[in-house]
Image (tube, helix red, strand yellow):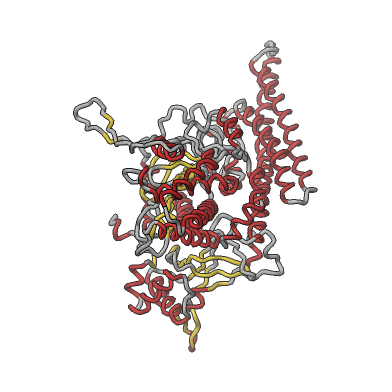
Amino acid sequence: MNVPEIFGSNVFNDAVMKDRLPSDAYKELKSTIESGKALDVDLANVVAHAMKDWAVEKGATHFTHWFQPMTGFTAEKHDSFIQPEDGGKIIMHFSGKELVKGEPDASSFPSGGIRATFEARGYTAWDPTSYAFVKDDTLCIPTAFFSYGGEALDKKTPLLRSMEALSKQAMRILKIFGNDQGVSQVLTTVGAEQEYFLVDQKLFKERPDLIYTGRTLFGAMAPKGQEMDDHYFGAIKPNVKAYMEDLDRELWSYGVLSKTEHNEVAPGQHEMAPIFETTNIATDHNQLTMEVMRKTAQKHGLECLLHEKPFAGVNGSGKHNNWSMSTDTGVNLLEPGKTPSQNSQFLLFLVATIRAVDEYQDMIRLSVASAGNDHRLGANEAPPAIVSIFLGEELTSVLHAIHYGEDYDDQKRTKINLGIDVLPPLPKDTTDRNRTSPFAFTGNKFELRSLGSAASLAGPNTVLNTAVADVLEDFADKLEGTDDLNRDLSKLIVETLDKHGRIVFNGNGYDESWIQEAQKRGLTNMKSLVDAAPAYIDKKNVDLFIKHGVYSKVELEARYDIKLEKYWKVLNIEALTMVDMVKKGIIGSVVGFMDQLSGVIEKKKNIGLDIEGSMEMNLIKDISANADEMMERLYYLENALYDAKGIEETYDIAKYYKEKVTPAMEALRDIVDKLELLVPHDMWPYPSYGELLYSA
């Protein structure tokens, strides 16, 4: 592979625009993008013509407005470039109007009541900050998606609003410190580590639960799981390596900065990590990455599982959101430098983030909540549901010294001497890492570790950006015009730590004592999406998002309804799939094996052998008892699903599924998994965990 030649080859990026557009048009487009102004019609036509010619040369025959509705997936409607001419001929045509605006059916996507069937009109609008690209012979134009009334129906629009809000307030802080020269905006950046499982495609197609829900609803644990710690960073199998190479090639062609790949903790689990990018671009690229992961796996006879918890008993998959703030001149505002205790600007942005996470911990928890992630958070693989911040020894000591007016000597970098002459001493970081922390400082960024692998990056980053913007606004209000910046800054930091230092926790997030400690500190512990969902309509949060123009009250109420509705619908599909698998597969297998055992018992009786206490008799009794219990639990689950139909309010039905249906599902699974261990492998209707986990 010629990687530099491949990289961005399918992207209408800045270099292509500069080459393809007339010089004055290119400069005008750049100015329009940077200023955030509306695109002039004449300029849009010039850009559309150049974009179409480039795409057609790449083999494109169609274009689509590529957007991110609140399904969590991307959406696209394809239109060809053809336009009829006299004489029965056609030309390939693409106008500025088609580039800038589209009109999909808004009532067919989740809207939380914003759109009804008789109010179908919606719009897509080109986001010129995210480059167009060619995928599957189609020109894909990243767009925002909103209703006839202007309400955001997607994940991109609020994210862009939140980025503008943070930039506005961060620029005020830079000006206070005299560091705004040459800076036109502050950008948030994200690098999203993406975990996933690979399984054999043939086995996948034999599991209705994987097909319908993305996770296994039944499955006895294999004799070997992840307990030997031998898969993590282990040698990559040739077929998986071939998949990863194809994945990189595809992603690089779309301009995705795919950097790191390795085996993860569980068998069959892997990770891809990109280099950080502006949050809007990183979000678009992550949505594209998940799509390419699935498609590329199928080319290799595999299936890529992005569910947060596809297998019980082994680690689930997350998406670590590495978040920071940088100027458009490349200065990272969360870079401590060699002497963080003397870096006043860094300290201000640091404590602003601490306060933001503490004040809006409920929204941060809600932003990562889903039916799938409820299975994962709090296990020994992912952070607990309690939101806290890990700062590490050095920064904690710095803030402690400031808080209590003590002197502080910046730690000097020490080296680790390994005691082996051939190995040089290695520089030692000033702090350790904490894998149990939901929000950990990792050198020059914060890592939000709570996201599930299938989640969009947009929601959590919209919350983070807006919360930090709000705190920065308050800080700027207090510091602008000060006659003694050092005095007032120190006072502000001390006051912030007094009130919000409770959110900082450097210990073991899995320790049971942390639950009691967090409760004493007044931190939230929302264990499920149902517990967290009301945060959407809490007055404090509604006021926050309205104030900064990120969400309207209607948009928040819509997301509250959508989140709860998706939650119970996911559980409903899972429950119905369980019922289907038991009735159409498992009952027949269990009865068939008992029939075989009965035949053996009958033969033994016929030849005069004592069958009481025999292996066959004991086994058939054990299976029969478990089968009877399975049917009892199956009927209980079916009755629970039937009773759910009488509940009308969205929150009430979601709560019912959490409290009634989910325990019924867990009970049914428990007994079915016991039966799987009693029935011969060749008679069990579905591939086992051992087959699935070690198939790729």
Q: Is residue 601 above or below residue 204?
A: above
Judge whether residue 82 can be spotted in this image.
yes
Q: Position of residue 206 (x, y in %)?
A: 57, 42
Q: Position of residue 561 (x, y in %)?
A: 68, 54
Q: Position of residue 331 (x, y in %)?
A: 35, 55
Q: Residue at x 67, y 50 (%)?
A: 564
Kindly indicate the quadrant of the structure image that contains residue 182.
Answer: bottom left
| Quadrant showing the C terminus | top left
Judge whether residue 317 can be spotted in this image.
no
Q: Is residue 594 above or below residue 234?
A: above
Query: In the image as oriented, which residue stretches furthest toward the front?
Result: 483
Kindly indicate the quadrant of the structure image that contains residue 16.
Answer: bottom left
Query: In the image as oriented, which residue stretches furthest toward the bottom?
Result: 86
What is the total number of numbered labels drawn onto the structure image?
0
Q: Residue at x 71, y 25 (%)?
A: 624
- Residue 486 lies left or right of residue 615; in this view the side is left
**Pick the front one: 259 or 425:** 425
| Quadrant showing the N terminus | bottom left
Q: Residue at x 77, y 51 (%)?
A: 648
- Residue 352 lies left or right of residue 333; in this view the side is right
Q: Position of residue 580 (x, y in %)?
A: 68, 42
**Pick the front one: 563 or 306:** 563
**Pick the front one: 488 or 431:** 488
Q: Residue at x 44, y 64 (%)?
A: 130
Q: Is residue 24 above or below residue 274?
A: below
